[in-house]
Amino acid sequence: MLIEENFEIKKLTSFKCGGKIKRVILPESVDEFVDVLKDNPKAKVFGNLSNTLVSSDGYDGTIVLTAKMDKYIFENDFVTSECGLKGPKLSQAAAEKGLSGLEFMIAFPGSVGGEVFMNAGAHGQSVKDVLVDALCYSPAKGIIKLSNDDMRFGYRTSICQKENLTVLSAKFKLNKEPIEQIKIKMQENLNFRKNKQPSLAMPNCGSVFRNPEGDSAGRLLESVGAKTFSIGSARVYENHANFIINPANATSEDILELMLKMHNAVKDKYNIELTPEVRYLGGCNKREDEICKILYQK
């Protein structure tokens, strides 16, 4: 497996932001992953960093990236995928076999593990609708298999977030449909993203905040004028108030300050505290730590 010391992470992140990571490990199989976590119990696990803001001051610890765990196999109407496979690749592979249920993944830059972890979904489809079971790693129990019901899926959440579980692989049950019909649905999803959300080529981490119950974070943010907000080189996307883009080398502190400004504007007007959907990795910047205590309630 690949092990890197003092690794420059910036180019790997969707925000194109971040400093040096003390140690990065990229296992290529479930067995390697388990061995790594046994040897490095305090390591933090990530997929392909599509939903993570990494501090420009870096991280003084070990992280495990699952990007090289990307094998998958089809069996009749079922597909089993390792966690590191990118969602769009699995979505396209299913479409070519005339299997529907993963069209929503085509517009997400994340990995399969991350999408199961957060019960990703869009356009009337979600992980919950198609997942059969997931192989997960528990620091206390080792490898465990969880059924759909065991996963306790909710809006952008699963049991994995509550019990510190890492998704290693997932099995999905799909439905036979004409390939042309599946591809039309996929193109509609891509067009929606193109019209409403920043291009994947524009550095961003997707939705910044989760929708509060019964409302939309984007609606709340637009109502407080967030589309005009910017700090340093970080700014809110002009076509959707729940996205931050980094067009010109914004620092992680710029982005966090902007997140705090958005959070406070909604709190001041509606007394609603938005919860970040973006993960944060850092710990070497005092101001960033102060902001994170407010945003993440930690």
Image (cartoon, grey):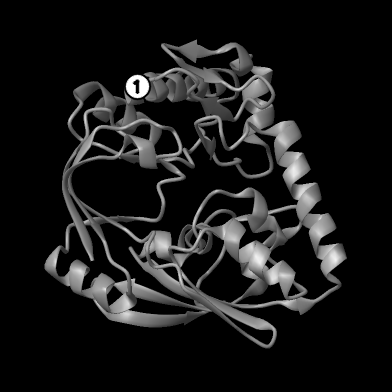
Image coordinates for residue 13, horizontal then vertical, percent: 40, 40
Image position of 58 with respect to 34: above or below = above
Which residue is depicted at the point 51% across and 52% down? 110
Can the viewer see residue 122 in this picture? yes
Which residue is depicted at the point 60% across and 22% down? 237
Seen from the viewer's position, the closer of residues 158 and 73 is: 73
Image coordinates for residue 271, horizontal then vertical, percent: 55, 26
Image coordinates for residue 62, horizontal then vertical, percent: 18, 52
Determine which quarter of the picture holds residue 172. bottom right
- Please state if 130 lies on the left or on the right of 85 as rendered: right
Can the viewer see residue 149 in this picture? no
Residue behind mark 1: 251
- Amino acid type at image mark 1: Thr
Q: How many other residues sit within 10 Å of disc 1, few (<14), some (14-19) or many (≥20)?
A: many
Which residue is depicted at the point 43% across and 63% down? 84
Image coordinates for residue 163, horizontal then vertical, percent: 35, 65
Seen from the viewer's position, the closer of residues 178 and 195 is: 178
Helix, strand or loop at mark 1: loop
